[in-house]
Image (spheres, helix red, strand yellow):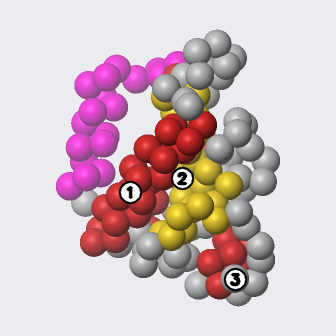
Amino acid sequence: MSADCIFCQIVRGEREAHRVYENAYSLAFLDIHPLADGHTLVIPKAHYERLEDVPPNEIGKIFEAVRKVTEAVQKAMGAPASTIGINNGRAAGQVVAHLHVHVVPRYPGDSGGTIHSIVRNPSKRTLEEVRQLIAAALKN
């Protein structure tokens, strides 16, 4: 854990949070700047800054908590859907350098966009060029 990380401080009980769920690997609490009632953050208890920093044997355990919290948030808030997202790195809008998954309840007509409304950066490459770059990165 990181001494100066606000989310690590919440895990250790040094800062207050409106906790909604906890297991051995994860903690879920309400976002202090909610996009909707029930907007919840699910974090690993261990300090990992980004998704790719989480060991493979732990990622599934964290996402088990995301699934459980998502179901509970939708039920509790009467939401027929939710948007689940990760701002993975500062350039993506990550403010706290501790991996966190946003669970935002969604409703018809709530004026929220889809995941496709986040970035508008048309590619200058073909899909095949992009596929080859990603495939090569996966081999290394």
Residues in magenta, as a range: 122-139
The kind of secondary structure the magenta stretch mainly shows is helix
Q: Distance from label 3 to label 2 (Cα)?
A: 20 Å
Q: CA distance from mark 3 to mark 1?
A: 22 Å
Q: Is residue 104 left or right of residue 24?
A: right
Question: Does the magenta portion include 20?
Answer: no
Q: Is residue 34 above or below residue 65?
A: above
Of label 1 and label 2, which has the lower sequence position? Answer: 1
- Are there few (<14), some (14-19), or many (20+) residues within 10 Å of tag 3? few
Using a 10 Å C-alpha cutoff, classify the residue at mark 1 as few (fewer than 14 neighbours), some (14 to 19) or many (20 or more).
some
Q: Which residue does the numbered mark 2 point to in the structure image?
A: 101
Element marked by disc 2: strand
Q: Position of residue 47 (x, y in %)?
A: 55, 76
| Position in image of residue 139 (x %, y %) | 20, 55
Side of 4 relative to 56 (left or right):
right
Amino acid at circle 2:
Val
- What residue lies at 31% left-to-right and 40% top-to-bottom? 133
**Kind of residue indicated by mark 1:** Phe
- Quick one: quadrant of the N terminus? bottom right
Name the secondary structure under disc 1.
Answer: helix
Q: Are marks 1 and 2 in contact (CB under 8 Å)?
A: yes
Residue beneath disc 1: 63
Q: Nearer the viewer, mark 3 or mark 2?
A: 3
User: In terms of depth relative to the viewer, which is nearer, 121 or 126?
Assistant: 121
